[in-house]
Amino acid sequence: MSEDLEKIIRRVYREWKAAQPETGGLHPDEETFVSFLEKRLSAEENERMKNHITTCQRCADILSLQIRSKGLEEKEVPAQLLEKTKKMVSEMLTSYILEIILKLKEKTLEIINTTGDVLLGQELVPAAVLRSRQIKDFKDTVNILKDFKDILVEVKIESKDGNTFNLTVIVKEKVTQNIIKDMRVTLLKDNLELESYLSESGKVTFEHVLLGKYTLEISTAKDKLATVILDIKI
Protein backbone atom coordinates (compact mmCIF):
# COMPACT_ATOMS: atom_id res chain seq x y z
CA MET A 1 0.00 0.00 0.00
CA SER A 2 2.86 2.40 0.80
CA GLU A 3 4.27 1.88 -2.71
CA ASP A 4 0.88 2.69 -4.25
CA LEU A 5 0.66 5.88 -2.17
CA GLU A 6 4.10 6.94 -3.34
CA LYS A 7 2.98 6.53 -6.96
CA ILE A 8 -0.20 8.48 -6.30
CA ILE A 9 1.71 11.28 -4.60
CA ARG A 10 3.97 11.57 -7.62
CA ARG A 11 0.93 11.79 -9.90
CA VAL A 12 -0.80 14.60 -8.00
CA TYR A 13 2.41 16.39 -7.04
CA ARG A 14 2.48 18.96 -9.83
CA GLU A 15 -1.13 20.00 -9.33
CA TRP A 16 -0.39 21.83 -6.09
CA LYS A 17 3.40 22.10 -6.16
CA ALA A 18 3.32 25.31 -8.23
CA ALA A 19 1.98 27.09 -5.14
CA GLN A 20 4.68 25.65 -2.85
CA PRO A 21 8.25 26.93 -2.34
CA GLU A 22 11.35 25.30 -3.68
CA THR A 23 13.47 23.82 -0.93
CA GLY A 24 17.16 24.34 -0.54
CA GLY A 25 19.76 22.47 1.41
CA LEU A 26 21.28 19.07 0.70
CA HIS A 27 19.70 16.69 -1.81
CA PRO A 28 20.01 12.86 -1.84
CA ASP A 29 22.76 11.47 -4.07
CA GLU A 30 22.24 8.89 -6.82
CA GLU A 31 23.06 5.96 -4.54
CA THR A 32 20.40 7.08 -2.05
CA PHE A 33 17.78 7.26 -4.82
CA VAL A 34 18.64 3.75 -5.97
CA SER A 35 18.62 2.41 -2.42
CA PHE A 36 15.22 4.02 -1.85
CA LEU A 37 13.75 2.39 -4.96
CA GLU A 38 15.24 -0.99 -4.02
CA LYS A 39 14.02 -0.68 -0.40
CA ARG A 40 17.52 -0.90 1.04
CA LEU A 41 17.29 2.21 3.27
CA SER A 42 16.73 1.99 7.01
CA ALA A 43 13.28 2.94 8.32
CA GLU A 44 14.57 6.34 9.46
CA GLU A 45 16.33 7.04 6.15
CA ASN A 46 13.28 5.89 4.20
CA GLU A 47 11.01 8.28 6.11
CA ARG A 48 13.45 11.16 5.67
CA MET A 49 13.61 10.44 1.93
CA LYS A 50 9.81 10.45 1.63
CA ASN A 51 9.57 13.77 3.47
CA HIS A 52 12.21 15.31 1.22
CA ILE A 53 10.58 14.12 -2.01
CA THR A 54 7.22 15.63 -1.10
CA THR A 55 8.77 19.06 -0.55
CA CYS A 56 11.45 19.18 -3.26
CA GLN A 57 10.51 19.58 -6.94
CA ARG A 58 14.02 18.73 -8.12
CA CYS A 59 14.21 15.39 -6.32
CA ALA A 60 10.61 14.46 -7.18
CA ASP A 61 11.46 14.91 -10.87
CA ILE A 62 14.67 12.88 -10.54
CA LEU A 63 12.84 10.05 -8.78
CA SER A 64 10.09 10.08 -11.41
CA LEU A 65 12.70 9.75 -14.18
CA GLN A 66 14.40 6.88 -12.38
CA ILE A 67 11.10 5.07 -11.95
CA ARG A 68 10.27 5.42 -15.64
CA SER A 69 13.77 4.30 -16.63
CA LYS A 70 13.28 1.14 -14.59
CA GLY A 71 10.10 0.45 -16.51
CA LEU A 72 7.87 0.32 -13.45
CA GLU A 73 4.22 -0.03 -14.34
CA GLU A 74 2.06 3.07 -13.99
CA LYS A 75 -1.57 2.19 -13.28
CA GLU A 76 -4.62 4.42 -13.47
CA VAL A 77 -5.59 5.72 -10.07
CA PRO A 78 -9.29 5.79 -9.01
CA ALA A 79 -10.53 9.39 -8.80
CA GLN A 80 -11.71 8.97 -5.20
CA LEU A 81 -8.33 7.69 -4.06
CA LEU A 82 -6.58 10.43 -6.02
CA GLU A 83 -8.57 13.16 -4.23
CA LYS A 84 -8.01 11.52 -0.85
CA THR A 85 -4.25 11.40 -1.42
CA LYS A 86 -4.15 14.98 -2.70
CA LYS A 87 -5.82 16.11 0.52
CA MET A 88 -3.38 14.03 2.59
CA VAL A 89 -0.35 15.59 0.86
CA SER A 90 -1.79 19.10 1.13
CA GLU A 91 -2.41 18.65 4.87
CA MET A 92 1.09 17.29 5.35
CA LEU A 93 2.62 20.36 3.68
CA THR A 94 0.41 22.68 5.70
CA SER A 95 1.85 21.17 8.87
CA TYR A 96 5.37 21.49 7.47
CA ILE A 97 5.13 25.13 6.34
CA LEU A 98 4.25 28.36 8.13
CA GLU A 99 2.76 30.84 5.68
CA ILE A 100 2.50 34.54 6.55
CA ILE A 101 0.99 37.15 4.22
CA LEU A 102 0.97 40.74 5.49
CA LYS A 103 0.17 44.17 4.08
CA LEU A 104 2.10 47.22 5.23
CA LYS A 105 0.11 50.45 5.51
CA GLU A 106 2.49 53.18 6.75
CA LYS A 107 3.54 51.63 10.08
CA THR A 108 0.50 49.38 10.45
CA LEU A 109 0.79 45.70 9.61
CA GLU A 110 -2.37 44.01 8.37
CA ILE A 111 -2.66 40.22 8.48
CA ILE A 112 -4.00 39.01 5.13
CA ASN A 113 -3.50 35.30 5.82
CA THR A 114 -1.44 32.95 7.98
CA THR A 115 -1.32 29.27 8.86
CA GLY A 116 0.06 30.10 12.32
CA ASP A 117 -1.33 31.53 15.56
CA VAL A 118 -0.98 35.23 16.40
CA LEU A 119 0.35 36.49 19.72
CA LEU A 120 -2.15 39.10 20.93
CA GLY A 121 -0.82 40.51 24.20
CA GLN A 122 -0.38 37.40 26.36
CA GLU A 123 -2.96 35.44 24.38
CA LEU A 124 -2.12 33.07 21.51
CA VAL A 125 -4.99 33.36 19.03
CA PRO A 126 -5.62 31.35 15.82
CA ALA A 127 -5.89 33.54 12.73
CA ALA A 128 -9.47 32.36 12.14
CA VAL A 129 -10.48 33.62 15.58
CA LEU A 130 -8.86 37.00 14.89
CA ARG A 131 -10.91 37.29 11.72
CA SER A 132 -14.10 36.45 13.62
CA ARG A 133 -13.23 39.26 16.06
CA GLN A 134 -12.46 41.50 13.09
CA ILE A 135 -8.91 42.04 14.34
CA LYS A 136 -6.33 42.25 11.57
CA ASP A 137 -4.30 45.42 12.12
CA PHE A 138 -1.19 45.63 14.32
CA LYS A 139 0.57 48.92 15.04
CA ASP A 140 4.12 48.09 14.01
CA THR A 141 4.90 44.54 15.15
CA VAL A 142 3.24 41.15 14.70
CA ASN A 143 4.32 37.85 16.29
CA ILE A 144 3.18 34.57 14.71
CA LEU A 145 3.83 31.09 16.13
CA LYS A 146 3.44 27.58 14.78
CA ASP A 147 4.12 24.05 16.02
CA PHE A 148 6.31 21.80 13.88
CA LYS A 149 6.28 18.32 15.44
CA ASP A 150 8.57 18.74 18.47
CA ILE A 151 9.41 22.42 18.06
CA LEU A 152 7.70 25.80 18.28
CA VAL A 153 8.74 28.53 15.84
CA GLU A 154 8.07 32.19 16.59
CA VAL A 155 8.42 34.77 13.82
CA LYS A 156 8.43 38.46 14.74
CA ILE A 157 7.91 41.01 11.95
CA GLU A 158 8.63 44.64 12.85
CA SER A 159 7.93 47.53 10.47
CA LYS A 160 10.79 50.03 10.37
CA ASP A 161 10.29 52.91 7.91
CA GLY A 162 7.40 51.92 5.67
CA ASN A 163 9.67 50.23 3.13
CA THR A 164 11.68 47.77 5.22
CA PHE A 165 11.15 45.49 8.19
CA ASN A 166 13.15 43.50 10.72
CA LEU A 167 12.58 39.78 10.90
CA THR A 168 13.35 37.77 14.06
CA VAL A 169 13.10 33.98 14.40
CA ILE A 170 13.09 32.10 17.70
CA VAL A 171 12.89 28.29 17.93
CA LYS A 172 11.91 26.45 21.11
CA GLU A 173 11.26 22.90 22.22
CA LYS A 174 7.50 22.47 22.24
CA VAL A 175 7.26 20.59 25.53
CA THR A 176 9.91 22.31 27.66
CA GLN A 177 9.81 25.74 25.95
CA ASN A 178 13.61 25.73 26.08
CA ILE A 179 15.27 27.68 23.28
CA ILE A 180 17.00 25.44 20.74
CA LYS A 181 20.60 26.49 20.19
CA ASP A 182 23.01 25.86 17.31
CA MET A 183 20.32 26.30 14.69
CA ARG A 184 20.79 27.83 11.25
CA VAL A 185 18.27 30.23 9.74
CA THR A 186 18.55 31.02 6.03
CA LEU A 187 16.71 33.82 4.22
CA LEU A 188 15.99 33.19 0.54
CA LYS A 189 14.32 35.19 -2.22
CA ASP A 190 13.49 33.67 -5.61
CA ASN A 191 15.37 30.53 -4.47
CA LEU A 192 18.57 32.54 -3.95
CA GLU A 193 20.20 32.70 -0.53
CA LEU A 194 20.40 36.26 0.78
CA GLU A 195 21.65 35.72 4.34
CA SER A 196 22.29 32.74 6.59
CA TYR A 197 23.20 32.71 10.28
CA LEU A 198 24.17 29.98 12.71
CA SER A 199 22.91 31.06 16.12
CA GLU A 200 24.06 29.74 19.48
CA SER A 201 21.37 31.75 21.28
CA GLY A 202 18.44 30.26 19.36
CA LYS A 203 17.47 33.70 18.06
CA VAL A 204 18.25 35.14 14.62
CA THR A 205 17.39 38.63 13.33
CA PHE A 206 17.49 39.89 9.74
CA GLU A 207 17.51 43.69 9.64
CA HIS A 208 16.19 46.18 7.06
CA VAL A 209 14.63 43.56 4.79
CA LEU A 210 12.83 45.04 1.78
CA LEU A 211 9.16 44.31 1.15
CA GLY A 212 8.53 41.20 -0.93
CA LYS A 213 8.17 37.44 -0.80
CA TYR A 214 10.76 35.37 1.07
CA THR A 215 11.44 31.85 2.29
CA LEU A 216 12.99 31.14 5.68
CA GLU A 217 14.59 27.75 6.22
CA ILE A 218 15.29 26.69 9.80
CA SER A 219 17.63 23.75 10.33
CA THR A 220 20.20 22.08 12.54
CA ALA A 221 23.39 20.43 11.34
CA LYS A 222 21.41 17.21 10.76
CA ASP A 223 17.85 18.13 9.86
CA LYS A 224 15.62 20.82 8.47
CA LEU A 225 13.23 21.88 11.23
CA ALA A 226 10.77 24.16 9.46
CA THR A 227 10.03 26.35 6.46
CA VAL A 228 8.41 29.79 6.65
CA ILE A 229 6.89 31.50 3.63
CA LEU A 230 6.69 35.26 4.19
CA ASP A 231 5.05 37.76 1.84
CA ILE A 232 4.85 41.43 2.88
CA LYS A 233 3.32 43.87 0.41
CA ILE A 234 2.01 47.42 0.34
Image (spheres, rainbow, N blue to C red):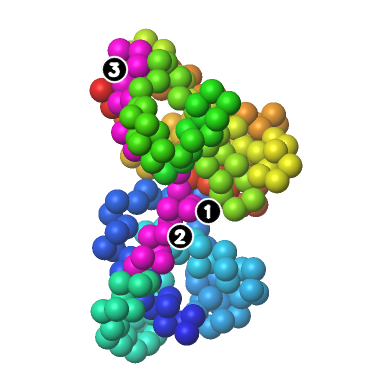
Quickly name the residue at label 1: 26
Query: Eyeballing the image, is 97 above or below 205?
Result: below
Mark 3 is on which residue type? Lys
**Residue 84 drawn in magenta:** no
* Mark 2 or 3, nearer chain start: 2
- Horizontal placement of 104 versus 171: left or right? left
Callout 2–callout 1 Cβ contact below 8 Å: no
95 part of magenta stretch: yes
Query: Nearer the N terminus, badge 2 or badge 1?
Result: 1
Q: Position of residue 199 (x, y in %)?
A: 65, 31
Left or right: where 45 falls relative to 71:
right
Left or right relative to 172: residue 59: left
Q: Amino acid at mark 2?
A: Met
Where does the image place residue 229, in percent across and percent down from the top left?
40, 40
Q: Where are the magenta residues, as a range?
A: 86-113
Q: Give the image quarter of residue 112.
A: top left
Mark 3 or 1, which is nearer the eye? 3
Label 2: few (<14), some (14–19) or many (≥20) C-alpha neighbours in 10 Å: some
In the picture, the disc for residue 50 is: none
What residue type is disc 1 on? Leu
Work out whether residue 106 can be spotted: yes
Task: Of the two numbered discs 3 and 1 on the same chain, state the one appearing first in sequence.
Answer: 1
Separation of residues labelled 2 and 3 (CA atoms)? 33 Å
Q: Is residue 51 above or below residue 150?
A: below
Compute the Cα span from label 3 to label 1.
38 Å
What residue is shown with label 3? 105
Residue 92: image tag = 2
Q: Name the one closer to the observer, 205 or 33.
A: 205
Between disc 2 and disc 1, the foreground one is 2
Q: Which residue: 56% across, 46% down? A: 147
Residue at position x 66%, y 32% in the image: 202
Q: Between marks 2 and 1, how big is the CA–CA gap?
A: 21 Å
